[in-house]
């Protein structure tokens, strides 16, 4: 386990060092330009990210997340950013594979409308069961969600944190106490390129101690494509090593395309 953790940390360290540029002062556009906004999960930007996750083991798991983001202007000072995640799942089961829609999650984060190099937001997170056994929790759950990030000198670093607690559902299934975090770390390069290491780390607090955590460590690269000014696209891909996982999965391959419909 210690060797795997060291392996992941070394990857992130080397990737960050290789991305250094000779910049000595903050960019006046930190937090405002489109290259910064694509790294901000609560930016004032209408977008449709489509994210693919392949967990490699004896029997691979496939998840495609459709996650539209819609900001709503509440006032001159405040913005409500909504993000809905709809996962289409293909995972191993006792009878072969189970397919269907997993738990649908919704985030409503209230954040300052005029963002600078530092951004924060907070609001409720909701998780809806779809009724398909084996594809997620079976109880309706809610919880708090907070996000904070800093953008300076081409770097973006921050954290999104959520914890879901079950409030309704069948009495014959277990309660939900589920932590979801997204580490936010990226470095801008030239011509729209960037490197990143933004793993999603989760914990099922009600599971056995050796099956609680899912921790992938690794890195990837991406590019903002703006040739078509009416539909900019952000594409990225990364490779991660699981240092903890409730199954025997070893590696995670991620790929994502984000279609940017409108930004301010």
Image (cartoon, rainbow, N blue to C red):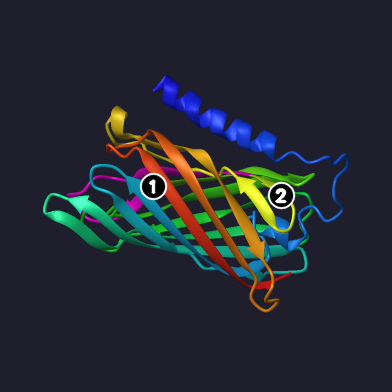
Let me know if residue 245 appears in the view: yes
Q: Tell whether 23 sits left or right of 128.
A: right
Q: Residue 130: image x %, image y %?
A: 29, 63
| Closer to the camera in the image, 24 or 175 | 24
Q: Which residue is mark 1?
A: 165
Is residue 228 toward the left or the right of residue 167 in the image?
right
Q: Position of residue 53 (x, y in %)?
A: 40, 53
Query: Residue 71 falls in which quadrant of the image?
Result: bottom right
Q: Are marks 1 and 2 in contact (CB under 8 Å)?
A: no
Bounds of the magenta span? Answer: 165-185
Tag shown at residue 188: 2
Total numbered labels placed on residues in the image:
2
- For the C terminus, the quadrant is bottom right
Residue 235, percent from left and from top: 57, 61
| Residue at the spot 51% in from the left edge and 48% down from the top edge | 238
Residue 22, how many percent across, how many down? 83, 40
Q: Earlier in the sequence, mark 1 or mark 2?
A: 1
At a point 67% along the width and 79% down the height, the residue shown is 230
Query: Was residue 85 drawn as part of the magenta stretch in this picture?
Result: no
Q: Is residue 178 magenta?
A: yes
Query: What crowding class fits label 1: few (fewer than 14 Cα within 10 Å), some (14-19), or many (20 or more)?
Result: some
* Residue at the outermost bottom position: 230
Tell me the tag on residue 149.
none
Label 1: which secondary element = strand
> For numbered disc 2, what is the local secondary structure?
strand
Q: Say if 75 sits above or below 42 in the image.
A: below
Q: Split into 4 quadrants, where in the image is the N terminus?
A: top left
Q: Residue furthest top?
A: 2
Residue at 51% across, 38% down: 218
């Amino acid at each position: 386990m210690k060797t795997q953790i060291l392996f992941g940390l070394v990857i992130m360290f080397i990737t960050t060092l290789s991305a250094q540029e000779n910049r000595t002062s903050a960019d006046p556009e930190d937090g405002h330009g489109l290259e910064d906004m694509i790294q901000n999960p609560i930016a004032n930007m209408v977008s449709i990210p489509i994210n693919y996750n392949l967990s490699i083991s004896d029997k691979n798991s496939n998840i495609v997340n459709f996650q539209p983001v819609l900001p709503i202007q509440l006032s001159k000072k405040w913005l409500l950013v909504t993000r809905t995640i709809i996962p289409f799942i293909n995972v191993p089961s006792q009878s072969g594979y189970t397919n269907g829609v997993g738990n649908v999650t919704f985030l409503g984060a209230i954040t300052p409308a005029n963002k600078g190099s530092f951004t924060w937001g907070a609001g409720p997170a909701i998780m809806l069961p779809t009724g398909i056994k084996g594809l997620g929790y079976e109880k309706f759950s809610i919880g708090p969600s907070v996000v904070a990030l800093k953008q300076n000198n081409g770097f973006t670093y921050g954290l999104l944190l959520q914890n879901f607690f079950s409030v309704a559902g069948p009495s014959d299934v277990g309660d939900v106490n589920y932590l979801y975090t997204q580490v936010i770390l990226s470095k801008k390069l030239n011509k729209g390129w960037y490197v990143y290491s933004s793993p999603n780390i989760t914990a099922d607090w009600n599971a056995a101690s050796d099956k609680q955590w899912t921790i992938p460590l690794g890195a990837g690269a991406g590019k903002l494509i703006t040739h078509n000014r009416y539909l900019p696209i952000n594409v990225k891909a990364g490779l991660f090593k699981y240092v903890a996982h409730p199954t025997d999965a070893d590696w995670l391959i991620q790929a994502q395309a984000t279609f940017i419909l409108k930004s301010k």
